[in-house]
Image (cartoon, coloured by chain):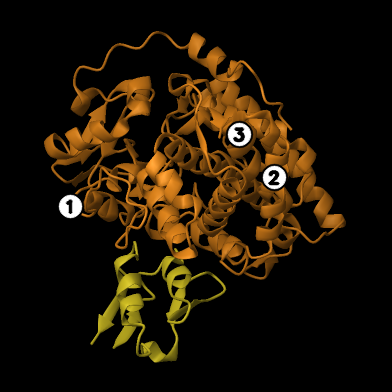
Chain colours: A yellow, B orange
Amino acid sequence: MRIKVDAEKCEGHSRCYSLAPELVDVDDLGNAFELNDGEVPAGLEDKARLIVDNCPEFAITIEE
Amino acid sequence: MTDTTDTHSDPAAEAVAASIPERCPVTDLATDYDMFDPDYLRDPFSAWAELRDTCPIAHTERYGGSWLPTRYDDLQAMAKMVPILSSKSPIVIDMPEALAKDDATGYNAASPISADPPEQSWTRRALLPHFTPKGIAEDRSYTERLCNELIDGFVDEGGCDAAVDYAQQIPPRVIAKKLGVDDGMVDEFIEWVRGVLELGLQQPELRAKYRDIIRSFFAAEVADRRVNPKDDLITALCQTEHEGEPLPDEVVVGMCNLQLVAGIDTTWSSIGSALWHFAGHGDDRRRMADADDGLWDTAIEELLRFYAPVTMARNAMEDVEYGGVTFREGDKILMNFPGANHDPDHFEDAHEVHLDRQRNRHVAFGIGIHRCAGSNLARMEMQVALKTWFERIPEFTLSDPDAVTWAGGQVRGPRIMPVTFG
């Protein structure tokens, strides 16, 4: 499973970073980016779905 | 620090209320909603539910006229209608021209919240690094100490006014510390902020008075930092450059004005609403008494969703059709993010608080380019304020539910809220 953060849509809410710092980090402006090229480590699939479902900008997608 | 009072009153709010002509009763929400109606402030949720089904973009002529969308999808779309829906005047009631006193510098009074791109973009970039999760990390230990000290002041009294003695005391000190201004002036900051926004909304002279006080205060602070740099946010903004030049004084003053006005009564409203919820909902209160971090995280987001305090305004820059209505040039639109958060099309059991809600795309901090720049700071303050309260005072109830008053207009939250411990 891979996640993708759309940098054009992200407005820096940091909801994903607070829920899953194992999957995303934020830059100096607070905008999110994927760790490990978006690869979701085994066992963290539910967290990946959680950050998709909590992004107010609909900026995160999952590629299975 | 404000003393715990036996008689709970709010003289400043009562003076403003007494000066406002008696309001006509609302007979049709869709064409005549009233953002200051005490019944609406106590329970806006049922009004939004009715409007969402019957007239999802309502209108009123009251207070100079405004539009009120209530559906999540509409708020999402309208937040992106930049700059046709401009943020240059995010306050829903404009100042009379005689008092408006346009800033001769041409810069914005509270950038970036009251600006459109490009000014909005570069002022926001200057601010954001100080408010990322990492940028606010060192504000947490100060906030923890502060919350404990506040509780020390009333914990043995058997009760307090949780709005006045606690919620209201936290954000002004946190933002004063961050800006680098005298936190001994907290009572003044509270008075200024209420004067310029909560109470000043219906009182232009009051609003102008406190606007000028805040500007003068920060003009002096900025002038001081230019010659006496310190380790604080005002200095950092003074040292920030745009296109190779330091930010002009007027811009820094406007940004400081924003920190004070937007960073205080918003967050104290969220903390206060959360405490109001727990005081009146025993099952939820007892559940939080031994909550783990995971439950705290979802609970904070759920309380932000349910009791979202902030409704900023936009101005139509030209006639624009949207969602079956026509916004005329100059029309005010209330960005009703709190209403969007209760839309059943996007939130299961939207009318219920579920502390462990997993899917929660709430928009309490707005969306799009004007997403609250201080949202990480506000969220941290809420976490610390509530966790510290529950560690010290796990059992508490409203002393007199009818005594609770709610501020209205553009920031909703409890202003008087006596609680009893144990």
Q: Are marks 1 and 2 in contact (CB under 8 Å)?
A: no
Q: Specify which label sits upstream in the sequence, 1 or 2.
A: 2
Residue B40: image x %, image y %? 32, 26
Question: In terms of image quadrants, where is residue B394?
Answer: top right
Which mark is nearer the camera, 3 or 1?
1
Q: Are marks 3 and 2 in contact (CB under 8 Å)?
A: no
Chain hosting mark 2:
B
Please name whichever residue, B56 or B319, is drawn nearer the observer in this view of the structure.
Answer: B56
Which mark is nearer the camera, 3 or 2?
2
Q: Secondary structure at mark 1?
A: loop
Q: Specify which label sits upstream in the sequence, 3 or 2.
A: 2
Q: Which residue is mark 2?
A: B173
Viewport quadrant of the N terminus of chain A: bottom left
The crowd level at tag 2 (other Cα within 10 Å; few <14, some 14-19, many 20+) is many
* Res. B82 visible in picture: yes
Q: Secondary structure at mark 3?
A: helix
The crowd level at tag 1 (other Cα within 10 Å; few <14, some 14-19, many 20+) is few
Residue drawn at 67 percent across, 59 percent down: B139
Q: Which residue is mark 3?
A: B193
Residue at mark 3 shares a chain with residue at mark 2: yes
Please name the amino acid that badge 2 sits on: Arg
Residue drawn at 32 percent across, 46 percent down: B353
Please name the amino acid that badge 3 sits on: Val
Chain hosting mark 1:
B
Please name the amino acid that badge 1 sits on: Asp
Residue B313: image x %, image y %? 39, 40
Q: Which residue is mark 1?
A: B345
* Res. B335 visible in picture: no
